[in-house]
């Protein structure tokens, strides 16, 4: 194993959980950069379709959740984040990406680059309990 893999194993970089709206091609490309990436689609439908359950799964696996779900008034991660912290729960970070940015092939790859840059700027512990918009 090389130095990059050793750094990842020491958890310098965050482990990631991508919500199901991200393409497998995109998540694989981030995995190919050496990141520990899980996908919501790898879990049962009852987890994939329930944002609370998905965040709980991300917490169990100690992963930062990357999602586009921020506009549904009944279930969005802006609301869930606030509820979570008010109830004394912690999470390993939520990163919001505007949905329209991942819908086109061109902007999807720009998002990939921005995500990789973002993950290389912040240490694992700086993401805990944070709700952040991808810059």
Image (tube, rainbow, N blue to C red):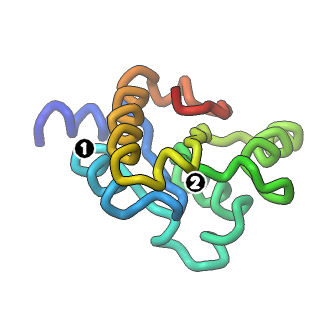
Q: Position of residue 2 (x, y in %)?
A: 11, 37
- Report the side of 88 relative to 17 (left or right): right
Along the viewing direction, whichever of 99 and 39 lies nearer the viewer: 99
Crowdedness near tag 2: few (<14), some (14–19) or many (≥20) residues, C-alpha within 10 Å:
many
Q: Which quadrant of the figure has residue 45?
A: bottom right
Image quarter of the N terminus: top left
- Residue at the spot x=23%, y=43% of the render? 33
Q: Which residue is mark 1?
A: 34
Could you say which disc has been placed on residue 58 in the image? 2
Using the numbered discs, state the Cα–Cα distance from disc 2 to disc 1 in whole angstroms: 19 Å
Q: Is residue 125 visible?
A: yes
Q: Position of residue 57 (x, y in %)?
A: 60, 60
Along the viewing direction, whichever of 69 and 121 lies nearer the viewer: 69
- In the current view of this chain or complex, which residue is farthest to the top? 121
- Residue at the spot x=55%, y=23% of the render? 126
SS at mark 2 in the image: helix
Q: Are marks 2 and 1 in contact (CB under 8 Å)?
A: no
Q: Position of residue 100 (x, y in %)?
A: 54, 49
102, above or below 53, in the image = above
Could you say which disc has been placed on residue 109 in the image? none
SS at mark 1 in the image: loop
Crowdedness near tag 1: few (<14), some (14–19) or many (≥20) residues, C-alpha within 10 Å:
some
Q: Earlier in the sequence, mark 2 or mark 1?
A: 1
Along the viewing direction, whichever of 40 and 67 lies nearer the viewer: 67
């Amino acid at each position: 194993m090389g130095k990059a893999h050793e750094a990842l194993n020491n958890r310098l970089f965050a482990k990631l959980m991508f919500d199901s709206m991200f393409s497998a091609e995109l998540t694989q490309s981030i995995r190919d950069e050496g990141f520990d990436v899980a996908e919501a689609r790898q879990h049962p439908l009852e987890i994939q379709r329930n944002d609370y359950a998905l965040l709980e799964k991300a917490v169990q696996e100690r992963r930062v959740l990357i999602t586009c779900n921020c506009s549904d008034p009944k279930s969005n991660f802006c609301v869930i984040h606030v509820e979570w912290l008010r109830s004394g729960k912690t999470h390993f970070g939520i990163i919001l990406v505007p949905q329209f940015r991942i819908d086109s092939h061109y902007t999807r790859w720009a998002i990939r680059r921005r995500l990789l840059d973002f993950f290389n700027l912040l240490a694992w512990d700086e993401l805990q309990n944070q709700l952040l918009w991808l810059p």
